Amino acid sequence: MATTDEAATIQAQDEESVVNLTRALKVPWKRKWLVLLCVAVATSGGFFYALKQPKIYQTKCTIQIEPRAPNVLGRREGNEVVDIGAGTFWSNREYFETQYRILESRDLAEVVVKRLNLHKDPRFWNAPAGSGPVEYSILDSAQFLQAAIRVEPVKDTRLVNIYIKHTDPEVAELLSNTIAQAFIDRNLERAMLSTEGALGWLTEQLNKLRETVTASEQKLYEFKKDRNVLSVSLEDRQNLISTELTSISEVLTKTKTERLQLEAEKGALTEAFKQTQEHDLGWTKRSADMLLQNLKSQYAKELIDLSAVQSKYGPSHPNVRNIEAQIKETQGQIEGHVKSLMTGIETEYQAKVRNEKNLKVLLDDVHKRGVELSLLAIDYNKLEREKEQNAKLFDLVLARSKETDLARYLHFNNISLLDLALRPTGPISPRVGMIIAVSAMLGFMIGIALTFLIEFLDFTVRSYEDAQQESGAPLLGVLAGRETFLARTKYSKYGSGGESDGLRESLDRNGFDLIASTHPHSIIAEAARSIRTNLLFMSADTSMKRLLVTSPGPSEGKTFVATTLAIILAQSGKRVIIVDTDLRRPRLHKIFPGQGARGLTDVLAGQCVPADVVEQTTVPNLAVALAGPIPPNPAELLHSTRFMELLAQLNEMFDVVVLDSPPLGAVTDAAILSGVVDGTILVARHGRTHKASLRHGSRQLRRLGSRIFGVVLNDADFSRGSYYRYDYYRTYGYSYRADEPTVAAN
């Protein structure tokens, strides 16, 4: 939480910021006539400038740009012959931007120039009437026209406005419409030229493709002729070979199966023959031949009969021998028949083997021919594809060529004129009101800048802050000058008419330096009393019997301040004497005329005593000691013992001794006097005392060990701003009426 001191500091800083801002705002007000002069000059200049400017007229025509032109031929794979903008968002954007640049191009401008003969038209070149013919180059005319063109697309539409500025409204209208029409014609011309160029290229390609198709067909014919595939197509031959392969494979498989069957029967018959020789009947079950089956059945029956006869008659019976003879005969028949079967099977078997071998050879031959035909098909298909592709390309180019040839006669354009330009009824420039307003604003800104520049370049004391900061001493008060006093009294309720003239006569008669006495209720008297009060409070613990009033330079009002302060001190009841210690350019004898001829230099020269030079003035309690004759060595006299004795005697005779001294910067007199007084009052004149002089004088006094009671700002011009009065007296808690009635004290 901030302490009371911190809060007070923050409040003081805020108040200081407000004061600085207020002072900055009052800087232009102090020189308001300079600002008004700048505004008046700039406004007049702007007005005359606007009157001298030629009147500019503007026309506008509107065109519509579509990405595609109407396509009466329909849309197929090829689309337009010349693609004029259709596509994606970015391609459309690029297309429109390109059209805008074409509208502003030199090429289009040259077309308009040639179409209207603008390079020979004096109206186009703003030539005065009766000046005769003009002749400019087409390039210069095109560039001049380019400068007058402004293209502005209408947002979120496909419309474009074309603006033309010119001093002649009729010419502006003509140019605007001609540019739009020339742009439309150029776009159509470009499309037609592109179409004709495309048609020429297509015709050339069509002739080449026709030769290519003929050559490819001839190559295919020669190929088929050389391979004997004219009557039957290669595909059919491939199908035949495939069928033949299938048939041969089936026959070969069947032959191989039959051979294997014969081989099995052959084995069975061989086994049967062995069984027959061994008188084994088991073989009879393995044979499928009917004769053989019958013989085997007969053989079995005879064996049964033989067994029965032997068991009945014995082995030697004739019937047994007959049966045995029959058995041998049957057995021989079986063996002969088996041999015959074996011979037939062997013959058939060998035939099957030969047939199978021949089929394999035939199959290999067909397979070989199939492979050869497949290799032949590769070349054939290649030639066939080449012919088909050439034929398709030829058909496409032929169709496209016919479409392009037809498109030459269809004058469709994707750019159209929407609104013709109308003749303008009034100029768009110069905008007199705007020029005057801008000029006035510019003059105002220049005036404000000049006031701050003058303020910045002014190195004199302009405010009580300057006086305090440069002197390093507290401000005792601010006194107005003669003209400021008269001006403020003139406009007060007591200073109008004859009263103002009477005040001026009173000041001329009694002198402005005695205004604190002659006009005790004036603004200056009140300000002087404030100085007296501040001085008494600042030196409450210090003796204030000897006061030195000086200034950094001449003509800064130190004598006026010393006199006014002496009068105010005398009015408070103190016995006061003002001593003119300016032994080089004394002035008190002009303020208090009619006093004695002797002065301070006479006392210091030992020609009289102090009482002889002390004269009572018309102001009660105020005496004066004049300088006397000007000596050749003022500094030595002021540094003498007699001067110290004089000051001591004056202190015994009066309560306060006020010394009016020479300036600090000119001679050393003031520096000498500052060492024999109780304190020094510095006087700085508003607008005259340089800050560096005030700073140097203050440092000089401090180096000598002199005490500075404070600084008084003299001749403050309240008519240029009241911040001196209000800010200062509000700060120090004093106020007074500036328009208090003034009474001349005679």
Image (cartoon, rainbow, N blue to C red):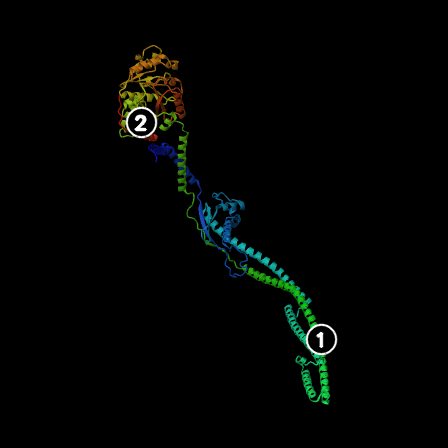
Q: Which residue is mark 1?
A: 350
Identity of the amino acid at label 1? Gln
* Residue 69: % across, % down: 50, 57
* Residue 670: % across, % down: 38, 18
Quadrant (top left, top right, bottom left, bottom right) of the C terminus? top left
Left or right: residue 451 versus residue 142 is left
How many discs appear? 2
- Is residue 196 something one can see in this rendering? yes
In which quadrant of the rendered view does residue 43 lie? top left
Q: Identify the secondary structure beneath mark 2.
A: helix
Real-space Cα distance between discs 2 and 1? 163 Å
Left or right: residue 162 versus residue 374 is left
Left or right: residue 234 versus residue 692 is right
* Residue 382: % across, % down: 64, 63
Q: Is residue 59 above or below residue 50?
A: below
Q: Nearer the viewer, residue 577 or 517?
A: 577
- Mark 2 packing: few (<14 Cα in 10 Å), some, or many (20+)? many
Q: Is residue 618 above or below residue 68?
A: above
Residue at (26, 24) in percent of width and height:
743
Q: Which residue is mark 2?
A: 485
* Residue 388: % across, % down: 61, 64
Identity of the amino acid at label 2? Phe
